[in-house]
Amino acid sequence: KPSVNRPPTPDEDDAPESFEKDEVTLREIINVKLVESGEKENLMELVRDRLVECGWKDEMRIVCREHVKKKGRKDVTVDELIRVITPKGRGRAVEQNPKLHCISCSLMVF
């Protein structure tokens, strides 16, 4: 029901598109502000340090070494290692520190 005090509600089809456009713009603005202030690099460093402290980096190194031993040194590419450890690494990061994982995902999106 239209009201004088309230603008008309947009169609459902239009709402997600306009929301996504606003979200992208907001992400771009946040990214620029983080880069300009130097905070993006500080946050990335914090994430790296915390991952090292909780043993995540060592675990991922072990996963890589086991995969290389299994496949053979000459038959493994960097791209293959990335495909193998990415799901495991993300899973372990979430288990060990969910808040840290959220921060790192946000930084990677920007």
Image (spheres, helix red, strand yellow):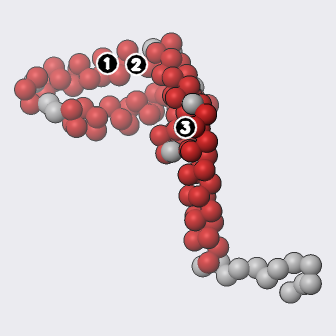
Q: Is residue 12 visible?
A: yes
Q: Farthest residue toward the front?
A: 36
Residue at mark 1: 61
Nearest the eye: 43 or 37 = 37
Q: Does 46 appear above or below 9? A: above
Distance between mark 1 and mark 2 Cα atoms: 6 Å
Mark 1 surroundings within 10 Å by alpha-carbon count, few (fewer than 14), some (14 through 19), many (20 or more): few
Q: Position of residue 45 (x, y in %)?
A: 51, 23
* Marked residue nearer the N-terminal end (2 or 3): 3
Q: Are marks 2 and 3 in contact (CB under 8 Å)?
A: no
**Badge 2: how crowded within 10 Å, few (<14), some, or many (20+)?**
some
In the displayed structure, would residue 35 be above or below residue 50? Answer: below
SS category of the residue bearing label 1: helix
Instruction: Indicate the amino acid at tag 1.
Output: Arg
Secondary structure under the numbered disc 3 in the rendered image: helix
Which disc, if any, is residue 57? 2
Tell me the residue that label 3 is attached to.
35
Name the element at disc 2. Answer: helix
Look at the numbered discs 1 and 2 and tell me whether their residues touch, using CB distance below 8 Å: yes
Q: Position of residue 18 (x, y in %)?
A: 62, 70
Q: Estimate the spatial distance between the alpha carbons at disc 1 and disc 3, rounded to whole Å.
A: 30 Å
For the residues marked 2 and 3, what is the alpha-carbon distance in whole angstroms? 25 Å
Dot 3 surroundings within 10 Å: few (below 14), some, or many (20 or more)? few
Which residue is drawn at the image coordinates 92% and 78% (left, top)?
Answer: 5
Q: Along the horizontal axis of the image, is 90 left or right of 102?
A: left
Give residue 19's quadrant in the image.
Answer: bottom right
- What residue is drawn where x is 36% and y is 35%? 86
Q: Residue 33, percent across and down?
A: 61, 42
Residue 91, x across and y down, in percent: 45, 33
